[in-house]
Amino acid sequence: MIRRRTAAKGGAAAAVIAAAVALIAPWEGLRTASYQDIVGVWTICYGETRGVGPGQTVAPEECRSRLATRAAQFEAEIRPCLPATLPVETRAAFVSAAYNIGSGAFCRSSMSRRALAGDLPGACDALMLWVKAGGRTVPGLVNRRTAERALCLSGLD
């Protein structure tokens, strides 16, 4: 059963994006100089990888703007892979996961399949399947997925 505010086809997109950004930012952390993440991908700001290479720097204000823009893009990209109406908290948790794993991986995941089948608690639980990087379990990802799962379930009765 769905309660609280619901997000239907972008109607509450601003609330979803704000909640997703609030969840993503502390887990990704702000780094204004480019670096290679634990699997060797060039990254900057709050986990941004698109167009990033060695030796880049970005002002914190630009990083905050990029995060909001990219969260909105991920929300739009995964929208077709989820039920049209979801609680804001649940959709925000899925946006956070997609930001981390990619929208393609999200749309092929058991999170998406379970949500589309109407099993929202199962979809939230499936977040915990995404705790590895480079073939090994990463404690930070376990903690992040635990927080995403808690937010995801908080939107459900």
Image (cartoon, grey):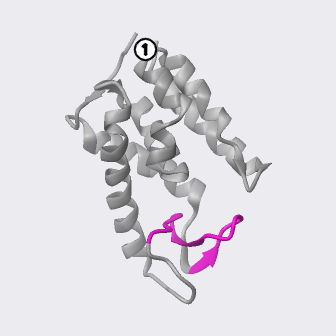
From the viewer's perspective, is residue 154 above or below residue 46? Answer: above
Quadrant in which residue 129 is drawn: top right
Type of amino acid at the residue the image marks with label 1: Gly
The magenta segment:
34-50
Closer to the camera in the image, 149 or 103 = 103
Can you see residue 62?
A: yes
- Residue 112: percent from left, percent from top: 46, 30
**What residue is shown at x 45% (from left), y 69% (from top)?**
50
Q: Quadrant of the N terminus?
A: top left
- Judge from the rendering whether residue 137 lies leftward or rightward of residue 78; answer left or right: right
Badge 1 marks a residue whose secondary structure is loop
**What residue is shown at x 38% (from left), y 33% (from top)?**
81
From the viewer's perspective, is residue 65 above or below residue 112? Answer: below
Can you see residue 154?
A: no
**What residue is shown at x 45% (from left), y 38% (from top)?**
107
Q: Is residue 113 magenta?
A: no
**What residue is shown at x 66% (from left), y 33% (from top)?**
128
Closer to the camera in the image, 57 or 81 = 81
Residue receiving disc 1: 118
From the viewer's perspective, is residue 80 above or below residue 55? Answer: above
- Residue 141: percent from left, percent from top: 68, 47
Q: Residue furthest right?
A: 136
